[in-house]
Amino acid sequence: MTTALWPEFKVEEKPTGVVRVLEGAGEELGRKTGGRVVFRVLQQLAGGTPSWPFRYECDLWVPKLQYRYFLCDVFASAEGFPVRVTSGEIDRPDIADEAALQAALAELFHADQVRKIVQNLLSMTV
């Protein structure tokens, strides 16, 4: 007879995950620019840090030019949250939940330099 070594697990609906929040942010930029500039999320290996095993590299992608502009990295814990957002504009190391991640992304997206970059990328697609 085999003894069960693992406990039973309940499958529960969880809050929106980190990737879904990031992808949702990308959809909005694509809609606002008619798909000329989009926000992409590329999952990367984090490089072995136990605190932040997941890394999502986020960029601005211009399909017409086949051009990408690195925007930020988002590092996530194995549990999903907390996350850390780093870029040239912000460094937020302890983002505890979805609402705080959205606030950090909004701060980044509204930064003067990011707005200028998006505007410049748009002008190059005309």
Image (spheres, rainbow, N blue to C red):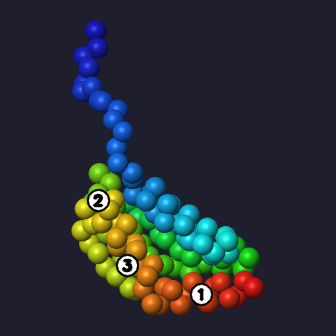
Q: Position of residue 2 (x, y in %)?
A: 29, 14
Q: Position of residue 122 (x, y in %)?
A: 65, 84
Within 10 Å of disc 1 (Cα), the crowding (few <14, some 14-19, many 20+) is: few
Q: Are marks 2 and 1 in contact (CB under 8 Å)?
A: no
Query: In the rendered image, which residue does mark 3 sit on?
Result: 107
State the CA–CA distance, disc 1 to disc 3: 17 Å
Q: Are marks 1 and 3 in contact (CB under 8 Å)?
A: no
Quick check: 16 above or below 83?
Answer: above
In which quadrant of the rendered image does the C terminus lie?
bottom right
Residue most extreme to the front? 32
Which quarter of the figure has residue 80?
Answer: bottom left
Within 10 Å of disc 2 (Cα), the crowding (few <14, some 14-19, many 20+) is: some
Among numbered discs 1 and 3, the one appearing first in the sequence: 3
The numbered disc on residue 72 is: none
Amino acid on which the number 1 mark rests in the picture = Gln
Q: Position of residue 110 (x, y in %)?
A: 43, 82
Amino acid on which the number 3 mark rests in the picture = Glu
**SS at mark 3?**
helix
**SS at mark 2?**
loop
Residue lying at 47% horizontally and 90% vertically, measured from the top left? 113
The numbered disc on residue 97 is: 2
In which quadrant of the rendered image does the N terminus lie?
top left
Which quarter of the figure has residue 13?
Answer: top left
The numbered disc on residue 119 is: 1
Front position in the image: 13 or 53? 13
**SS at mark 1?**
helix
Q: Is residue 113 rendered to the left or right of residue 96?
A: right
